[in-house]
Image (spheres, rainbow, N blue to C red):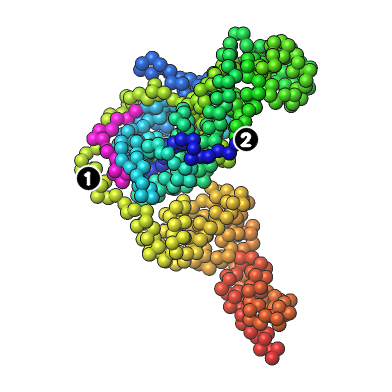
C-alpha cells in the first residue's frame, strides 16, 4: 500500500459556504427564525420526481424517489406557518435579507445584478415540503484575499435554509420546520489547486469576513461548507454537510485519497478487460442455495421475507478487495451505495468464506453462476423494489469504476470520511419561480452597501482587544467563537471581567465539549443568568465550570438546578474559616518545610474541599493570614 502525495495528484477544491443571516423573519414569511424542541402538530408527505420544462428528470431527484420514503414534519406556530407547510403562497421577499446579501456581495467585490430572479431548485429528499428550494442569484464574480492571494468568487445566492432532519428510519424521515425558510447566503468560490490546510484557511477567512458584518448568525449549524473536490481532472465530487474547519481539512484529505485510489483501481480494471454485466444473464436468485447457510445475516434476511441475489462479474477476481490506499476499496464503495436503499450491505467473493458463509455455500454459488478462477460475484439481500434499484445501482457503479471517479454527491462524516449520498444533480434541477416577482436592486442600495462595508477582520480584532483589554490570543478566540455577541452583552455593564468571561466562553465550554458533553444543552439565558449570579456574589468564579458541566451533561436544565445538584452554593465566612484551620492543622509539616511558600499546595487542598463554594481570592487571603499566624506562634 503506497502513501499519497497530495502535491502530485492535481488536487482541485472549490468551496461553497452556506451562512444563515441574522434577520427578524424568514425569507418568504413573517415567522421568527428560531429553533425549538417543542412541537404542537405534525403531518406527512410523499415527494416524487417531476419532469423539467424540457421533459427531463433530474438524476438526483430520480435517485431520491427510488427510496420511496414517507416524510413526517413537526411544526410549531411560533416558528413556522402555512408557507412552510406549502399550503400558502410565499410572501414578499424579506428586504433585510436582500440588503445583507448585497452588503456581502460588495464586501467580496462581486458584480451585483440590477434585477434578481427567484428560482426553484428541485429537492425531494424531504428537506423542503414543496419538493424544491427557492434561491436567488444576487451577484457573480469578485474575490476574497487570503494571505496575499486572491481567491475568485463564482456566485453569491440568497436562498431558503432547509428543514432540520430529526430522524432517518428505514421508510420514514422526520423533520422539524423551524429552520425551513431561514434566509441564508450561498457563496461559491472558484476551484483552487491547494493543500487541505490552505483550503481550511480560505474557509476561515471567508467565515471571518461574514462575521465582521455582524449580520450573520452564529452557532453549530449556522454555517456549513460544501466542498467540490477533483484530482487529475477527474469527475467532480460534491461533499455536503461539513460544519467545522477541522472536519473540512480531514474531508479534503480523505476525498483526495479516495479519488486517487479510484483512479488506480480504474487502471487495474482496464488491465482485467472487464465484461459489462448483463442484468438479464448475470443476476441470479440464490435463496434456495442458502437456506441451510449458517450466516445469521442470511437467515435473518430469509426470515424477514427478503430475496437474495448473486451478481456475477466476469474477469473481476480480487478487484473488490484491492486497496491502493488504506480504507479505499471498491467493495466498500458498493456497500455504502446500497445502504441508501435501506439494505445493510453486500458480501463479495474476495472476503468469503466469512460472516457464517462457509466454503460449501461458496461452491454451490460458483457452480450455479459458472464462476471461473478469474471471475467474482456479489451477494445482496433485500425486500420489494429496493433490491431491484440496488442491483441496478451496483451494475452501473461497477461500469463507472472503469472510468475512475464518478461525479456524485457525498456526505461528510464526523470522522472526516465521506459516504455516498446521491448522484450529482443536472441542469434539469433549476427552473423559474412562478409565485414571486423579480426583485430590483437599485444603484442607491448598492452605493449604500458599499459605504457600509465593515472593517476587516484584523481591524475588528484590534477594536476588540482595545475595547475589552484582551490579549491577542483571547480576542481571536472570542471573535471566531459562537459567543461574540453574548460576550459583548455580558461585558456591557462593565461588572464582569472581560478576560474571565472570554476564558469561560472559549476555554471552559470547549474543554467540557472535549470531554464529550453537549454545549447545545447550555442555553444563552442560562449563561447570562450564571454571570448575573456571579455579580450578585450568589456563586463564585470557581463554581461556573461545575454549573456548566451539570447542564451540558444533561443532569440539570437550569442554573438553579445545577447549583443544587452540584452543591455549589456560597458558604459563610465562619464555615470557610473552619475549613482553612483544618487544612492548616493537617498539613503543619508542609508549612514547617516551606513557610509562606506552602500557600500553593494548601490552596489546592482547600479549593478541592470547598469545591466552588468560596472564591479563590478569599481562600488565598484567609490561608495567608492563618499560615502567617501559625509561623508567628511557632517562633
The x and y percentages for residue 117 are: 29, 30
The magenta stretch spans residue 114: yes
Q: Is residue 547 visible?
A: yes
The N terminus - image quarter: top right
Front-most of residues 233 and 212: 233
N-terminal of the pair, mark 1 or mark 2, is: 2
The x and y percentages for residue 249 are: 50, 43
The magenta stretch spans residue 423: no
Name which residue lies at 58% across and 41% down. 415
- For numbered disc 2, what is the local secondary structure? loop
Q: Which residue is mark 1?
A: 447
| Figure quadrant of residue 420 | top right
Name which residue lies at 44% across and 64% down. 471
Which of discs 1 and 2 lies nearer the camera? The answer is 2
Front-most of residues 502 and 555: 502
Name which residue lies at 66% across and 73% down. 601
User: Could you tell whether 465 is left or right of 242 in the image?
Assistant: left
User: Could you tell whether 481 is left or right of 550 in the image?
Assistant: left
Q: Is residue 601 above or below residue 163?
A: below
User: Could you tell whether 295 is left or right of 346 in the image?
Assistant: right
Q: Is residue 124 visible?
A: no
| Figure quadrant of residue 341 | top right
Q: CA distance from mark 1 to mark 2?
A: 58 Å
The x and y percentages for residue 625 are: 61, 82
Q: Which residue is mark 2?
A: 1
Front-most of residues 340 and 251: 251
Q: Residue furthest left?
A: 444
Q: Is residue 353 above or below residue 215?
A: above
Q: Residues within 10 Å of mark 1 (few under 14, many from 20)?
A: few
Provide the residue span drawn in magenta.
106-119
- For numbered disc 1, what is the local secondary structure? helix
Amino acid at each position: 500500500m503506497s502513501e499519497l502525495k497530495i502535491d502530485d495528484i492535481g488536487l482541485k477544491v472549490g468551496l461553497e459556504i452556506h451562512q444563515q443571516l441574522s434577520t427578524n423573519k424568514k425569507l418568504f414569511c413573517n415567522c421568527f427564525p428560531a429553533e425549538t424542541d417543542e412541537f404542537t402538530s405534525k403531518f406527512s408527505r410523499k415527494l416524487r420526481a417531476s419532469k423539467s420544462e424540457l421533459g427531463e428528470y433530474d438524476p438526483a431527484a430520480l435517485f431520491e424517489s427510488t427510496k420511496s420514503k414517507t416524510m413526517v414534519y413537526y411544526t410549531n406556530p411560533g416558528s413556522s406557518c402555512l408557507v412552510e407547510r406549502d399550503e400558502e403562497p410565499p410572501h414578499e421577499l424579506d428586504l433585510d435579507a436582500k440588503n445583507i446579501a448585497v452588503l456581502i456581495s460588495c464586501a467580496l467585490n462581486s458584480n451585483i445584478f440590477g434585477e434578481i430572479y427567484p428560482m426553484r431548485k428541485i429537492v425531494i429528499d424531504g428537506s423542503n415540503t414543496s419538493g424544491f428550494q427557492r434561491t436567488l442569484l444576487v451577484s457573480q464574480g469578485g474575490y476574497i484575499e487570503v494571505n496575499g492571494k486572491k481567491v475568485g468568487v463564482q456566485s453569491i445566492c440568497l436562498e431558503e435554509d432547509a428543514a432540520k432532519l430529526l430522524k432517518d428510519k428505514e421508510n420514514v424521515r422526520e423533520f422539524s420546520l423551524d429552520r425551513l425558510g431561514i434566509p441564508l447566503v450561498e457563496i461559491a468560490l472558484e476551484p483552487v489547486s491547494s493543500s487541505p490546510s490552505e483550503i481550511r484557511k480560505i474557509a476561515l477567512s471567508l467565515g471571518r469576513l461574514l462575521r465582521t458584518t455582524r449580520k450573520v448568525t452564529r452557532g453549530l449549524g449556522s454555517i456549513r461548507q460544501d466542498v467540490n473536490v477533483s484530482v487529475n481532472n477527474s469527475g467532480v465530487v460534491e461533499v455536503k454537510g461539513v460544519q467545522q474547519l477541522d472536519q473540512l481539512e480531514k474531508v479534503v484529505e480523505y476525498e483526495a485519497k479516495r479519488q486517487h485510489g479510484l483512479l488506480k483501481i480504474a487502471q487495474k480494471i482496464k488491465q482485467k478487460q472487464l465484461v459489462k454485466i448483463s442484468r438479464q444473464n448475470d443476476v441470479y436468485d440464490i435463496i434456495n442455495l442458502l437456506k441451510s447457510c449458517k450466516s445469521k445475516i442470511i437467515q435473518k434476511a430469509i426470515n424477514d421475507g427478503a430475496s437474495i441475489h448473486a451478481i456475477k462479474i466476469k474477469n473481476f477476481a480480487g478487484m473488490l478487495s484491492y486497496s491502493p490506499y488504506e480504507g479505499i476499496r471498491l467493495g466498500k464503495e458498493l456497500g455504502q451505495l446500497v445502504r441508501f436503499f435501506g439494505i445493510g450491505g453486500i458480501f463479495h467473493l474476495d472476503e468469503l468464506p466469512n460472516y457464517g458463509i462457509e466454503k460449501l455455500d461458496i461452491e454451490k454459488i460458483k457452480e450455479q453462476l459458472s464462476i471461473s478462477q478469474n471471475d467474482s460475484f456479489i451477494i445482496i439481500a433485500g425486500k420489494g423494489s429496493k433490491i431491484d434499484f440496488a442491483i441496478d445501482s451496483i451494475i452501473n457503479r461497477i461500469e463507472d469504476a472503469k472510468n475512475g471517479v464518478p461525479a456524485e454527491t457525498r456526505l461528510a462524516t464526523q470522522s472526516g470520511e465521506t459516504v455516498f449520498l446521491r448522484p450529482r444533480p443536472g441542469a434539469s434541477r433549476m427552473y423559474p419561480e412562478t409565485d414571486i416577482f423579480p426583485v430590483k436592486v437599485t444603484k442607491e442600495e448598492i452605493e449604500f452597501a458599499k459605504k457600509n462595508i465593515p472593517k476587516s477582520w484584523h481591524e475588528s480584532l484590534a477594536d476588540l482587544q482595545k475595547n475589552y483589554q484582551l490579549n491577542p490570543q483571547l480576542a481571536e478566540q472570542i471573535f471566531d467563537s459562537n459567543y461574540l455577541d453574548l460576550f459583548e452583552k455580558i461585558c456591557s455593564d462593565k461588572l464582569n471581567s472581560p478576560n474571565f468571561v472570554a476564558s469561560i466562553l472559549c476555554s471552559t465550554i470547549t474543554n467540557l465539549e472535549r470531554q464529550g458533553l453537549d454545549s447545545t444543552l447550555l442555553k444563552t439565558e442560562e449563561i447570562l443568568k450564571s454571570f448575573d449570579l456571579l455579580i450578585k456574589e450568589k456563586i463564585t468564579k470557581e463554581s461556573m465550570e461545575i454549573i456548566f458541566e451539570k447542564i451540558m451533561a444533561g443532569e440539570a436544565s437550569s442554573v438553579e438546578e445545577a447549583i443544587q445538584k452540584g452543591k455549589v452554593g456560597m458558604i459563610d465566612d465562619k464555615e470557610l474559616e473552619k475549613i482553612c484551620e483544618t487544612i492548616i492543622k493537617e498539613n503543619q509539616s508542609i508549612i514547617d518545610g516551606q513557610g509562606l511558600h506552602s500557600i500553593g499546595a494548601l490552596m489546592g487542598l482547600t479549593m478541592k474541599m470547598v469545591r466552588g463554594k468560596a472564591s479563590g481570592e478569599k481562600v488565598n487571603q484567609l490561608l495567608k493570614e492563618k499560615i502567617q499566624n501559625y509561623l508567628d506562634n511557632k517562633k
